[in-house]
Structures are given as C-alpha cells and as structure tokens.
Amino acid sequence: MSETKGRKANPEGRMPLKEHLVEARNRLFKSALAMIPGVVIGWILYDPLLVALTQPLRDISHDRNIVATLNFQGVTTSFDLKIQISLILGLIIASPVWIYQLWAFITPGLTKKERRYTLSYMFASVPLFLAGIYAGWMIWPNIVKALTSFTPADSESANIITALEYLQFAMQLMLFMGAAFLVPVLLFALNAIGLVRGKTYLKAWRFTILGVTIVSAMAAPGSDVMSMFFLAAPLLILYFGAIGLCILNDKRRDRRDAKKTEESEANADVATPSTDLEKL
C-alpha cells in the first residue's frame, strides 16, 4: 500500500543520489547473499568439475603419447584455486537473482509499459546466459585439443600447464559464451527504447557473419567443419532472430505513430472551422 502511494506521489520514480546509493547497496547485498548457497554448491562440485575440465588432458596423454597435466605451483595454490572457482560457480548459479536485482534497480525510473518490456528481457536473459555457458562447456575439449596439438607427439614431449591459468581460461571462455548469448537481448532492448532500428542492424549482416565465423573457427577449430557450424549456427540464429523481432517492432511502432499523426491531423481539421466561426 505504501509503495502504491509512493508511486502516486512520485510517478516518475525519481529519488535523490543518496537514496540511489542506498538502493544500489541493498541490491548488491542481496545479490551477494544469494551467491552464498551457490558458493557452497561450487565448493562441493569443485572436485568433479576439475575432473571433467581436465579430461581433455588425459585424452591427449592417451591419444598422442605425451605428458599433459596440471601443475599446482605453491603451497596455497590448490586452496586459492578452489575458492576462486567456487566464487565463479556461485556467480553462475545465482545469475537469476543478480539479474533480477539489476532489473529491479533500473525499473523505478521506467514507466509501467517499459517495466513490462524489461521484465520480459530479464526472463529471456537467464536461460540464454546459462545456454551460452553450456555451449562453452561443450566446445571446451575441442579448444584444449586444438591448442595443444602443436606439441610434438613423442614420449619426451610434455604439456605441463599451470592449473590457475588453465581453469581461469576455462571459466573465462564459458562466461564469454554466456555474455555472447545475451547480445540478442541487448539488441532488442536498444531497439525497444528507440535508439537503433532493426534495418540498421541488418545492414551490418556481412560483418556479423564474418565475426561469428572467425570466433567459431577459433573456439571450435577441429578438423571438421561441422564443429564450427554447430557453434556458429545458434549465435547467428539468435542474432538474426533478434533483428527480425526488431524489424517487426519498428513496423508496429511506425503504424502506431502514423495513426497518432492521422488522429492529430483530423482533430486539427475539425477544430479549424469552429475557430473560423468564432471569429465571424
């Protein structure tokens, strides 16, 4: 009830800078609080996750007859690494909460219609972010095998990789893929608020296909073209799907604006004769 009264008293959702900072602090605190169960789960899942992430190294050792293993430098390296990976997993697991908190921090300054739009963006962002991380997980073995393929295949060769660099690279790749899958949501959001039209995105389709192809070739550089295709296809489908939605949204907005213009012109034409009669 008090929130409704506050909205009526302050329909534009404005607040002083101090209240903005307090609101940001509260949202960050809630996000950090939501990460605690995720960090605990990440701590528990660390050992099986490490086994899964290092499976490509064991495959390389078996298939190419070379030593491929991790090197944990220092006494506290294993402990520090477990904490870092647990924090990253906590961030991923708590993504629905901190994405919502980000949305809730922005929405007080938006209209009711804009809040409805942004709520749909939030619901789309969570599964897309997780889908991108899953895609990164699927291509990870190909990346490891490709980057270590330059090591000579003999019993005297070895790939002794620093554990911190190896696991950080894996986490960064998956977070990058998660962010890449959020690009369509960003494109549609910019279009929905009227900053960029769909045809503007469409004009850059050549550069988009080239960029996605290069990234896919680097991420899945197997000997077959299909591995690159399976990575590039979902990114292109998401991109061009977002452009299609933007173009449809532009057409709907143009029809609405044209209708408003016609109504305003009709009202002006109706008002003009009465004004002339009053002058007579």
Image (cartoon, rainbow, N blue to C red):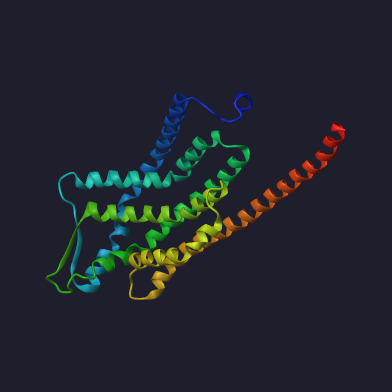
Indicate the position of residue 181 as horizontal and vertical percent values.
45, 56
Q: Quadrant of the N terminus?
A: top right
In the rendered view, does 157 fall on the left or right side of 177?
Answer: left
Can you tell which quarter of the image residue 276 is in? top right
- Residue at 36% across, 76% down: 224
Q: Is residue 238 visible?
A: no
Q: How many marks?
A: 0
Can you tell which quarter of the image residue 30 is in? top left
**Residue farthest to the bottom?**
224
Indicate the position of residue 56 as horizontal and vertical percent values.
29, 65
In the rendered view, does 268 fall on the left or right side of 223?
Answer: right
Residue 68 position (above or below residue 31): below
Can you tell which quarter of the image residue 7 is in? top right
- Residue at 25% across, 73% down: 63
Front-most of residues 112 and 255: 255
Front-most of residues 229 and 200: 200
Q: Quadrant of the C terminus?
A: top right
Indicate the position of residue 87 as horizontal and vertical percent values.
33, 43
**Residue farthest to the left?**
156
Q: Is residue 50 visible?
A: yes
Residue 256 position (above or below residue 51): above
Front-most of residues 32 and 68: 32
- Residue at 23% across, 44% down: 79
Front-most of residues 62 and 209: 209
In the rendered view, does 49 fall on the left or right side of 155?
Answer: right
**Residue farthest to the front?**
280
In the rendered view, does 114 fall on the left or right side of 142?
Answer: right
Indicate the position of residue 62 as horizontal and vertical percent values.
23, 71
